[in-house]
Image (spheres, helix red, strand yellow):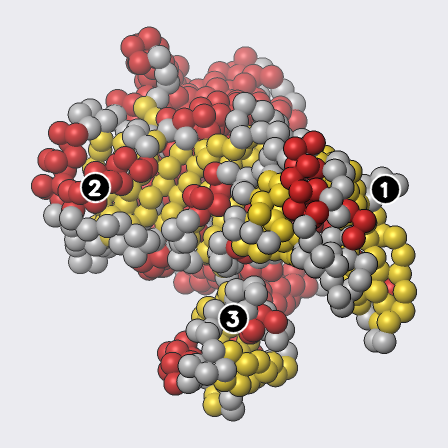
Amino acid sequence: MKMKCGAGAFHTIYIHKKPQKIMETNKNWFDKNYKLLMLIPLALLIVALVYLGIFYSEKGDFMYKDVSLSGGTTITLNGEVEAISLEKTLSEKYPNDISFRKLNDIRTGEIVAIVIETSAAPEKIKADVEQALGYPLNSDNSSIEFTGSSLSDTFYKQLIIALLISFILMSIVIFILFRTFTPSIAVIFAAFADIVMPLALINYLGIKLSAAGIAAFLMLVGYSVDTDILLTSRVLKKPEGTVNQRIYGAFKTGITMSLTSLFAVLPAFFLVTGLPDSFRQIFLILALGLIADIINTWLMNTGIIKWYCEKKNIK
Amino acid sequence: MASYKIWLLVIILIFCFLIIAPPWNLFEKGVVIQGISKNTSEFESGLRSGMILQSINGKAIDSVESYNKLVNSLNLEDSTKVSMETKSGTFIFYTNKELSLIVKEIPKTKIKTGLDLSGGARALIKAENKTLSDSEMSDLIAITSERSNGFGIKDITIKSVRDLGGESYMLIEVAGATPGDLEDLVENQGKFEGKIGNITVFSGGQDISHVERSGQQAGIEGCSAIQDGEVCRFRFPISLKEEAAKRQAEVTLNLGIDPENPQYLSQKLDLYLDDNLMDSLFISKDLKGQVATQIVISGSGSGLSRQEAVKEATKQMNKLQTILITGSLPFKLEIVKLDTISPVLGKEFTKNLLILGVLVFVIISAIIFIKYRKIKITSAVILTMFSEVAITLGIAALINWNLDAPSIAGIIAGMGTGVDDQIVLIDESVSNVQISLKEKIKRAFFVIFGAFFTVIAAMLPLFWAGAGMLKGFALTTILTITVGILITRPAFAEILRRIQE
């Protein structure tokens, strides 16, 4: 039922018929268990950190890097190519240093291109591919991308520095927004977990990260905190209702936001495969980050905020 | 009063559509000249790239195909008169060579796509074990630009980029088909030779020890009036190594005096860059047989006004100075990145991106409709999303930004943030809290601004990291969300208020 009161155009009051019964039952259960719920993201985070630690001690790095970050050549062959024999010939010539991938058309499923990656110099791999195919490569039938190892090293270092700067700048913005220590740290902590969890998963899946992939992590720093800001501002800055009601209200909005974003970024990775790899990787990382963010915001950040409200006696 | 927000959105949208796809372009007939070689009769006649060619010898052109047909029908065995009518005037020349023009259809939209979508080549060059100073970098760029003409590479941009670590790079981008000899162009400074007749008197990198670029001795000497305008003379000294000076003395000793210009010798000094003749200079008769290690190079430039003449003379001087230092810059070059992207695959990518765009729109609209079950709200969200993309594309077209795949990813990610903000606005406005709608929207904007500033803060470092290769991603994300905050979000809040009422 909608009632309008007062003469001003801005003064509108909405009274909903729906009773808050579910809220009440939620409340009891939630009040009892919210600290336990916090253990789920915490455990996931610890697993991710331990995994990254082991990964680092084994590989000497935090991720698998593709040729844009480690140096090397990518050759993209247009159209249908005799892939199997090509793969066989080249794999023998470049043992453990070559990878193949296919790009498919979105509707027909036909192969539109084959991507070959190796750390070899462009002249060498180009000559070998030409020999295997039996025809010369030119700009009508192929693309060749080369990144020198000196550039890729700087690229990598700078992107990592950029990621750190990005994280620090984001933290400053959060502190300016909320001006209180615990809620701000809770948001920053969630953002940290939003980066660590997808990174660990990507390493586990053996995906090689590109420069664009790291850029996606920067984006994630900014992108993933909006639900945390929503939660914190709804709980701390709004006087109406109980803390649980405000959390539940924020959750309803926040989960719609996350799911909408998730469904918007998923097709870019799963459905439309005939796109540049740099492009698809951005969306894969955003999708993983959004999933991690749902866990971190609604189990971890919410727990911290609720705990904080109890301590500070915020009703 | 508040409806100005909606009107502002409408006006900006119309403006953006006019920028993206100017309707007057649809009625334009002809082809655009994309490239033209220097030192050809058509170039001498005044034709330049960017002009819109409408007809040849009075026969209209409406496509690249009809251009090719017309050009093929020209009988170029003997010197033939060709009259090219463009929007900028008619150019007439005589030629018996194949035309060097490269033409393309008049683009229907002003949106430019990056190398990964349109095809082309990109090279990133740095000095080996050295960070170049600004002046060294500008010399390198000037030399490379000068040389690219000799290589016949058209539609090339050369600029310097700097990264987070302060390292500077020369970035070369060539649109469209990739020239096979791009590597030769970019991996060295080039070969410079000064010849008298067939004898090389000096070459770059070893014989010229110094080129005076500025200061008292180098610059414009004076100007004087000529029949239609002004002419200005320039001069600058160069220092030759002893051996080069001796070679010059030996060669000039046997030369006579030019009967037409008695103050000069009978042969000129020809300057070659990568074996292409760039300029020919008269040699003063005083230099005959002289072992001179200091010689003065002079020349002139003319224009309709004094200002124009000074500008032209300075340009000529700088060009000569650049050629003379070719090969003598104190560093070796290293190609750190070289990409040649096939235009064929780019077309496939562009098609897939469009399909993806539509898919994202449909999915988001469906979710919003399922969640709120209101046609009006769903339409408002779709309209806002659409406006954000259109305005971002309009700005990209306005600032001539080349949209590459990461830039488009940025737009989609920005759209995602936009939809999130709208969900916050809708949820706040329909909440059952007993405060005014204005207050509710104010609260929503706290979240929206918070999210806005965190994304800006997170994306800023990308402008500099990695020699700016991922700048597009940061730029379009920031553009899209800024358009959202400043233009579409206030309008959406207003539309929402009207729907609620």
In the image, residue B80 sits, relative to residue A171, either above or below, namely below
Would you name the residue on which mark 3 appears? B33
Secondary structure under badge 3? Answer: strand
Residue situated in front as seen by the camera: B498 or B455: B455
Would you name the residue on which mark 1 appears? B217
Where residue A278 sits, quadrant-wise, is top left
Left/right of residue B306 with respect to residue B15 in the rendered view: right
Position of residue B313 measured from the top left corner of the image (x, y, whole percent): 78, 57
Q: Residues within 10 Å of mark 3 (few under 14, many from 20)?
A: many
Please name the residue shown 90% across and 65% down the image.
B224
Q: Chain of mark 2?
A: A
Q: Residues within 10 Å of mark 2 (few under 14, many from 20)?
A: many
Position of residue B18 measured from the top left corner of the image (x, y, whole percent): 57, 70
Left/right of residue A17 with respect to residue B315 in the rendered view: left
Q: Are marks 1 and 3 in contact (CB under 8 Å)?
A: no
Q: Quadrant of the C terminus of chain A?
A: top right
Where residue A64 sits, quadrant-wise, is top left
Instruction: Give the Cα separation between the discs numbered 1 and 3.
Output: 41 Å
Please name the residue shown 53% across and 30% down the image.
B332
